[in-house]
Amino acid sequence: MYLPPAFREDRLEVLHAAVRELAFASLVTHGAEGLEASHIPLHLLPQPAPLGSLIGHVARANPQWRAARSPRPALAIFLGPHAYVSPDWYPNKHTTGQDVPTWNYIAVHAHGTLELIEDPGEVRAMLDQLTAQHEAGRPRPWKVSDAPADYIDQQQRHIVGLRLTITRLEGKWKLSQNRAAADREGARAGLAASARERERAVAAAMAEVNDPGNGR
């Protein structure tokens, strides 16, 4: 990922928090037919230190899992909130006219080694962990054990578990940090006024990342 210094995020706790929050990734591998990608939820585990690992699954009918029959390089891409930024929001545009549109976004790339989770007990544990993550906070959290055991066994035969051991973690918070303060505020205010939740989320991220007290 292209990482200009102004947009680079290296703090492991921030990257891990983003992966947990975003939770849904594009998993990219190179197989017999070339590049392959699946869009799947992934659960972050802290081990092995320091970067951790990601676990998830694909349908057995999805040929991508065959690329992991032996450990292979893979990339999981987590895309956060993103939004078009109009140059009309920059005070500088109204003075010089010398501005163009851009796109603000948050992205995390997890590079690593992908392998199969073949033990049925480990696959079941992965399903329990993934479910618990996304059911947390609900009034009546659903558990895998709530369904009949024979039904779960049948369903589990139709999936393949995957583990990506992370070897490199990259974060990009492209949120107008390279602009003058007045332009940053103009873009933030423009996005904050949007009717789209995604654009308001970018505005909130801009306010946080450009706060001098946030440690960047």
Image: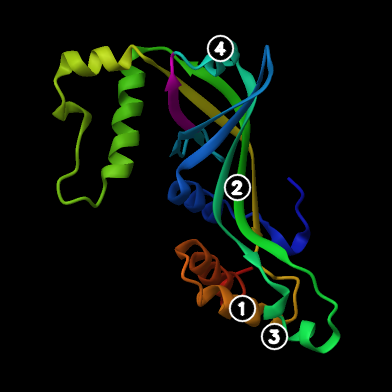
Tell me whether circle 3 and circle 4 mark residues in contact (CB < 8 Å).
Answer: no
Does the magenta portion include 55? yes
Q: Which mark is residue 108?
A: 2
- Along the polypeptide, which appears first: circle 3 or circle 4? 4
- Along the polypeptide, which appears first: circle 4 or circle 1? 4
Q: Residue 212 carries which label?
A: 1
Q: Which amino acid does label 3 sit on?
A: Ala
Scheme by which the image is coloured = rainbow
Q: Which mark is residue 47?
A: none
Q: What residue would you read off at disc 4?
A: 66
Q: Which amino acid does label 1 sit on?
A: Pro
Tell me whether circle 2 and circle 3 mark residues in contact (CB < 8 Å).
Answer: no
| Residue extent of the magenta highlight | 54-60
Which of discs 4 and 1 lies nearer the camera? The answer is 4
Q: Position of residue 35 (x, y in %)?
A: 68, 23
* Identity of the residue drawn at 67% across and 79% down: 89
* Identity of the residue drawn at 70% across and 79% down: 88
Instruction: Calculate the distance from the C-alpha at mark 2 to the C-alpha at mark 3.
Output: 28 Å
